[in-house]
């Protein structure tokens, strides 16, 4: 096998750069979390059509988490997606977005997971967003809890594998897996092929990652990143972050998207807007999606 010496990499760089510069957003799975536009899926599908996009991420439907809706509502959503030529990039759930549970609470989580499997099957995806438990709001992650967390995530991943599903566990604020290091540690501890990551570099920044890209990203096993959330942030004096429109903050969208593509990423890039303009999430999503697509064209 030929070695990629520094000289060879430099020689190949112009051709690679030319290829990336030619990138069209239509070549990628650009998505949005639907209720970040509107609770009415029909309105969201019109939004996607205006931008020429064909992927969606569903969390809420008609004002409720999809896992709290009856099967009839889920089947109607599938009909709407199919009629619009839109595919589901990932199904969002609140699975394991709770404190470490006792036996009764854990039984409720397994029931929630069964409902998630059912909804994912109806909506035509194998990929499910999950979490790795919350620590107390006024506290910090207790290192003593990680072995139990990894054990439960591994059990859940085994259930997913048996069901023919895949997990994309999200790093998120208030969770035992929030930063890039915590995400990397989880992936190292739970080897299940059913377990991957929803990489949210902005969440990592909010939780104190000084440089979620490139430093944070480089900690991760890129081959196990199955979904990506994008938005933008501005640093706060305490080292955290507040959300803002894409391009109005500090995150390097061009660099992150380019690095993922170079590493062979095939999943979706999903805008999770998380801010409003004139108290409107639809306006903010329009603004950020326009600017996100501009950055995709620069990759």
Image: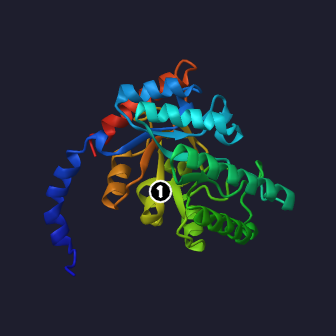
**Residue at screen point 32% across, 41% down:** 296
Q: Name the residue at the top extreme.
A: 278
Looking at the rendering, which quadrant does residue 279 occupy? top right
Q: Please say if 116 is above or below 242.
A: below
Q: Is residue 239 visible?
A: no
Query: Whole-percent x and y of residue 58?
Result: 56, 39
Horizontal side, residue 84 vs residue 240: left or right: left
Q: Is residue 215 visible?
A: yes
Query: Whole-percent x and y of residue 156?
Result: 66, 63
Per the image, the residue denoted by label 1 is: 226
Q: Please say if 281 is above or below 172.
A: above
Residue sitting nearer the eye, 117 or 43: 117
Looking at the rendering, which quadrant does residue 194 occupy? bottom right
**Residue at screen point 21% across, 78% down:** 3
**Residue at screen point 54% across, 66% down:** 184
**Residue at screen point 42% across, 45% down:** 269
Query: Which quadrant: the N terminus?
Result: bottom left
Query: Whole-percent x and y of residue 107?
Result: 80, 58
| Helix, strand or loop under label 1 | strand
Looking at the rendering, which quadrant does residue 144 occupy? bottom right
Residue sitting nearer the eye, 150 or 157: 157
Q: Residues within 10 Å of mark 1 (few under 14, many from 20)?
A: many
């Amino acid at each position: 096998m030929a070695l990629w010496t520094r000289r060879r990499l430099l020689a190949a760089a112009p051709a690679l750069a030319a290829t990336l510069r030619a990138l069209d957003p239509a070549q990628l799975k650009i998505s949005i979390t639907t209720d970040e536009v509107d609770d009415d899926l029909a309105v969201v599908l019109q939004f996607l059509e205006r931008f020429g996009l064909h992927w969606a991420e569903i969390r809420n439907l008609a004002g409720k988490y999809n896992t709290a809706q009856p099967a009839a509502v889920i089947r109607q959503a599938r009909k709407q997606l199919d009629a619009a030529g839109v595919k589901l990039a990932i199904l969002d759930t609140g699975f394991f977005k709770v404190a470490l549970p006792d036996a009764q609470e854990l039984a409720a989580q397994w029931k929630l997971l069964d409902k998630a499997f059912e909804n994912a099957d109806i909506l035509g995806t194998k990929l499910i967003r999950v979490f790795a438990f919350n620590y107390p709001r006024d506290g910090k992650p207790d290192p003593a809890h990680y072995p139990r967390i990894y054990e439960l995530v591994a059990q859940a991943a085994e259930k997913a594998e048996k069901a023919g599903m895949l997990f994309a566990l999200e790093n998120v604020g208030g969770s035992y897996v929030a930063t890039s290091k915590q995400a990397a540690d989880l992936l190292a501890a739970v080897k299940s092929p059913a377990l991957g990551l929803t990489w949210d570099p902005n969440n990592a920044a909010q939780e104190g990652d000084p440089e979620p890209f490139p430093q944070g990203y480089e900690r991760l096993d890129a081959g196990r990143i199955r979904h990506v959330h994008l938005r933008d942030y501005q640093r706060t004096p305490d080292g955290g972050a507040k959300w803002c429109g894409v391009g109005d903050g500090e995150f390097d969208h061009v660099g992150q998207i380019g690095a993922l593509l170079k590493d062979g990423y095939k999943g979706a890039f999903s805008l999770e807007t998380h801010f409003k303009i004139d108290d409107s999430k639809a306006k903010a999503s329009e603004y950020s999606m326009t600017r996100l697509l501009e950055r995709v064209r620069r990759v």
